[in-house]
Image: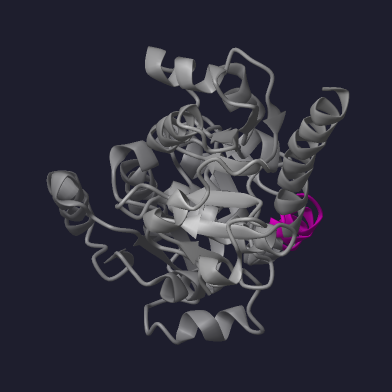
Amino acid sequence: MGIETISADNLQLIVPNLHRRYSGVTATNRMVAPRLAKMFRAAWLGPDAPDGIARMGFTDLLKLWRRRTPLIWHARRNDEMIAGVWLRSLGWPLKLVFTSAAQRHHTWITRWLIGRMDAIIATNDASASFLKREATVIPHGVDTDVYVPPPDRAAAFAETGLPGRFAIGCFGRVRAQKGSDVFVDAMCRLLPRYPDFTAVLVGAITPEQMLFANDLKNRIAAAGLQSRIVISGELAIEQVQRWYQRLTIYAFTSRNEGFGLTLIEAMSVGAALVASRAGAAELVVEDGVTGVLMTPGDADALVKALEPLMRDPASAAVMGERGRARVLEKFSLDAEANRIAMVYRNLFNATLDSQASA
């Protein structure tokens, strides 16, 4: 579906994706955009367009110049904010929205751009605290119809042919920021005690992280655990989703994160969760109920948090059930889309009020 099916006159929302490399920001954007397209006449600008939303090209963008009716430009990166500010200065009737997940002090250019936005969304309270202006906190959501518990978790694991009966996983690019080394260190200590478990690291290894990944492999080999700590490399999204369903326990080990979508993906499939206090973990996890929180970068803390669940997989299953229920209640894609839609509607209504009083 292209912009020819959504005319320049009735378009309400542009979802720009101006980043060529596929990233977590792209992934979260791809998930929620089709839900928003059910509520607004929307088009996706850039690569990696998902199904369920019209595509538009840069030539299509020219048709919107000097249009009188405002439309939303929802940026998620600096370059998208820059493009929105520039287009509006040249006569495009844009209402600018920015979603921030970063938990750090922003550069001067980012602060300047944020100041030009009509509305700001933060994915958690920590991210909002760095924005220096009012923001609406809207956590990311997950597709609970895709990230769903398997009919038979034991059978899902058995199809891998890996040793043991249970899987414990850590997903994301293999790098220090994701705590991949913390996970490997903990597994080298725990797996000899729990022969029913196999560990898997699912995620890409980029060329600049090859030395880091090789060091992890050397640690695994030194522990004699090559068959029980598997580093998969990058997988297709469908394979990643299947791997989630094989897990009894998920370890979120990031040292720092913007949000940490794997938290709610793992909870949505019913895996028990141990999570470092990074990203949105403290927002998402009820400590001791729907997961266990720990200090980032601390292998000792990870071992202490994981061992009771590995000792008693039945209790892990119960925690996973509670986690799934929490995601259904608080962190579904529909919940995220509905709250974003309220931000858009407030901007449209403010425009109408301004026009009426003019």
Q: Tell me: 174 left or right of 191.
A: left
Residue depicted at x 66% and y 51%: 12
| Picture quadrant where residue 227 is located | bottom left
Frontmost residue, 85 versus 311: 85
Residue depicted at x 49% and y 39%: 76
Q: How many marks?
A: 0
| Picture quadrant where residue 45 is located | bottom left
The secondary structure making up most of the magenta span is helix
Relative to residue 268, is residue 160 depicted above or below?
A: below
Residue depicted at x 67% and y 84%: 151
- State yes or no: residue 99 in magenta: no
Frontmost residue, 113 versus 136: 113
Q: Tell me: 302 left or right of 38.
A: left
Q: Tell me: 329 left or right of 49.
A: right
Magenta part of the chain? 321-333
- State yes or no: residue 329 in magenta: yes
Residue 311 seen in render: no
Relative to residue 282, is residue 328 depicted above or below?
A: below
Frontmost residue, 202 versus 78: 78
Q: How is the image coloured?
A: one colour
